[in-house]
Amino acid sequence: MTSTAASLLVYEPIPDLFSTGLDSNRAPLADGAIDPHYTLIQNPDVESTEAIVEDTTVFPISDGTWLPVSATSKWIGPRFNTAESAVGVYIYRTTFDLTGRDPSTVIIEGRWSTDNAGNEIRVNGVATANPPNTGFNLWTPFTILGTEVNLVAGVNTIDFVVENVAAIGYTGLRVEILHSNVNLPAGVAPAILTHPLSQIVAEGSTVTLVANASGSAP
């Protein structure tokens, strides 16, 4: 027997959507580095918009109380060591550009963890139906669909709302983008999204140069 025909449509990943604590090549940033893809648009602790990769050598990250860092994401917060961070609501924002793409085809799947309360996830300022995160030792999955939220064919924002509710002390955010897809319409010219980085190495070393490109077939 021969079945009816079925089609498979594979979308490309959203190129400028990143997990927390990664550089532009999606490698882990050093402790104390500023995350270039997330900003604090509300920060009751210090007058800064910088989201800083937290110190993984001290409590509560080092002893595994929080989810341990990995090659795919790290904890970020208002300070290098957030032991004395202020009580209040912190809002971390990441942006991504859908210019030339169909916003209705967006599928973003990820997970988040917070200390000590992840209240909600907002897209372009509007709360989504994703569940809150209730613990720094567990992941909470989230899904953002272009058919359900108000995405635009331009710059969009995702806000992760974290509250330090108990007392002055630790706070942080961890986000992992597991899948991000969007349909690229026909007729889009090729473009380099990530350029290779120059390197200086010793003779005999192994070197990897990476570049990412986008564009419609062929």
Image: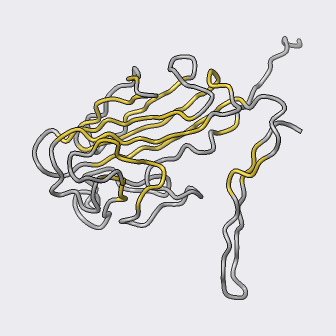
- In this view, 183 is above or below 38: above
Place residue 26 in its image quadrant: bottom right
Furthest residue to the bottom? 203
- The quadrant the C terminus occupies is top right
- Residue drawn at the location 36% of the way across and 54% of the way down: 50
- Residue drawn at the location 57% of the way across and 22% of the way down: 146
- In this view, 68 is above or below 1: below
- Residue 34 position in % (x across, y down): 41, 60
- Residue drawn at the location 55% of the way across and 43% of the way down: 17
Q: Is residue 71 left or right of residue 172?
A: right
- In this view, 36 is above or below 92: below
Q: Please, which colouring scheme is shown?
A: secondary structure
> Is 67 in front, or is 20?
20
Q: Is residue 218 left or right of residue 96?
A: right
Place residue 25 in its image quadrant: bottom right
- The quadrant the N terminus occupies is top right
Place residue 185 in its image quadrant: top right
- Residue drawn at the location 32% of the way across and 39% of the way down: 91
- Residue 11 position in % (x across, y down): 70, 32
> Is 210 in front, or is 99?
99
* Count of numbered tags: 0
- Residue 182 position in % (x across, y down): 66, 31
Furthest residue to the left? 167
- Residue 99 position in % (x across, y down): 66, 34
